[in-house]
Amino acid sequence: MSSLRDRIEGLRKAFEESARKAGDARALEELRNAFLGRKKGHVTLLFEDLKSVPAGEKREAGQLINELKDFVQEWLRQKAASGVASVSGGGSITTHGYKTEGGTDLTLPGRKRYVGTPHPLTLFEQEIERVFLGMGFTIEEGPEIETDYYNFEALNFPPYHPARDKWDTLFIKGDLLLRTHTSPVQVRVMERSKPPIRIICPGRVFRHETPDPTHLPMFMQVEGLVVDEGVTFAHLKGTLEYFLRALFGEKVKVRFRPSFFPFTEPSAEVDIECIVCGGRDAACRVCGGTGWKEILGSGMVHPQVLKNVNIDPEKYSGWAFGLGIDRTAMLALGIPEMRYFYENDLRFLRQFGTK
Ligand code: FA5
């Protein structure tokens, strides 16, 4: 027993001496292996030798070995906690004693990395496109910076016409302006193609507007245009009702209301039931308590517009619509504020698409 006691005392001194010299994480790790290593560590071997200690002395011997083990472990723990463990270059040890690469603590929980997803308005626009592509429409685009001619004049707004006031325009310079609607794309497409025409044109539009829950100075529209022989208002109504049912479900309540646009005659605006309050909140900031919200303007293409692009109005007729994507999306998704779409708050955006 006394020889075992001497051995333990000798090992403690040897550990203290080596520990004083151990200046970095690698040396500490070596020390740990030398004393606590699972096969040949000094302390491990002492436990092996315990098997041959006479039964009467086993308890005391085991206690002495455990004290040495605790001493070594506690010393290493304190050293690691004091920062030596984070010494860089190759492996290091953590406070838990796990070997790591380049100072990384493998025992810490992982960091969640978020994968980017399309913006909810992009997803909604794709949904709209899917329905119209299914009906044989094709997709066209036009410039966001337009001339007065395409944004107004070709659409039957003569200069100084009072209807221009409805589209509060952001002018750039001279004849150039930020398009106030996607209708100029109708004109560009009709100029370069012959009927039959069946297109939609999604894009950004700009107006000098004060933002509120359902109005923004920059928003998205999708234009639709059909020109062919024998096209009637019934086609317009049937197509838009089919489209809105595909988007909102079979039970959606929709109403057509007479309206005025210089480039369509007759014209109608389409309202959808207020999905935010269901018409039950007199103070609803989305529908103002009416229970309805306008989502699009539409009508039969004015004969003057067809003449402007050299399409014979005696032979051909057409219908068109312009839908607010942001406003329709807010109703479809039950969002009470259109501004949420543009605030880039990840807590809002992560609710859409794949997480
Ligand atoms: C137009 O812009 C016409 N060009 C629509 C049209 C096209 C009529 C083809 C006939 C034929 P209006 O200004 O009403 O019309 O806008 C159409 C839709 O855009 C609105 O119903 C609404 O959904 C959306 N919208 C209008 N102003 C804003 C705004 N400030 N913020 C967000 N959405 C808006």
Image (cartoon, helix red, strand yellow):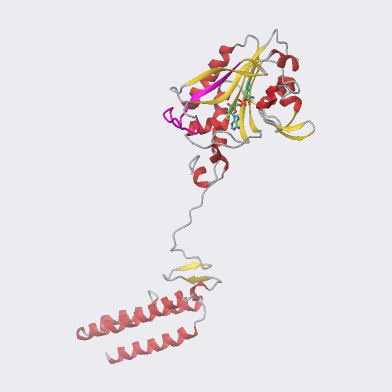
Locate residue 307: give its quadrant: top right
Task: Work out which residue is located at the far right of the displayed protein and give it.
Answer: 174
Task: Work out which residue is located at the far left of the displayed protein and give it.
Answer: 56
Residue at horizontal 59%, vertical 37%?
211
Horizontal arrangement in the rendering, residue 127 relative to residue 187 (left or right): left
Q: Is residue 332 magenta?
A: no
Q: Is residue 309 visible?
A: no
Horizontal arrangement in the rendering, residue 53 relative to residue 178 (left or right): left
Q: Position of residue 333 (x, y in %)?
A: 48, 34
**82 vs 53, nearest the viewer:** 82
Q: Main secondary structure of the magenta part?
A: loop
Residue at horizontal 19%, vertical 85%?
56
Q: Quadrant of ligand 1?
A: top right
Q: Position of residue 247 (x, y in %)?
A: 50, 26
Horizontal arrangement in the rendering, residue 62 relative to residue 197 (left or right): left
Extent of the magenta region: 267-286
